[in-house]
Amino acid sequence: MKKIAIIAHDGKKPEMVAFLMKNKEKLKDIDLVATGTTGGYVQNTGLKVEKLLSGPLGGDAQIAAMAAEKKLVMVFFFRDPAGKHPHEPDVQMLMRICDVHNIPLATNPATAQLLIDSNWQELS
């Protein structure tokens, strides 16, 4: 089964929830994994998700490890560029790992939608 990672900074969680609700039918049979707090929001949409640690407590690093091991087909990381994030080194590391291992990474809903729409056949 294909696995997608979902992460959202606090300021972007409403956008992430709206994106998930819009794509709920497409995502319902996909394995989803998320950082801790984000995972709670994902569960509230009715989708099943594997919850990892919170981002600042190592969840971003856990997802980066999955990307490095090619266990993910894509990552949705709805980032808040205006906010300060104490775990920014982990965020940068995750983005670098996605680039190194050629894992598609969407940092906003528009790009995530393009990834879902263009890869739908491979995901289902």
Image: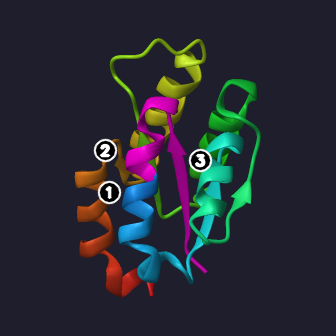
Q: Which residues are magenta?
A: 1-16
Q: Which residue is mark 2?
A: 108
Residue located at (30% from left, 51% from top): 109
Q: Circle 2 — which element?
A: loop
Residue located at (52% from left, 31% from top): 10
Toward which corner of the image does residue 64 lie, by quadrant?
top right
x, y percent for residue 111? 25, 53
Q: Which residue is mark 1?
A: 112
| Figure check: 87 above or below 53 | above
x, y percent for residue 16? 43, 50
Q: Which residue is mark 3?
A: 68
- The reply to whether the magenta stretch includes residue 7 is yes
Q: Amino acid at mark 3?
A: Ala
Which circle's residue, 3 or 1, is located before the other in the chain? 3
Mark 3 vs mark 1, CA separation in Å:
20 Å
x, y percent for residue 45? 56, 65
x, y percent for residue 62? 70, 41
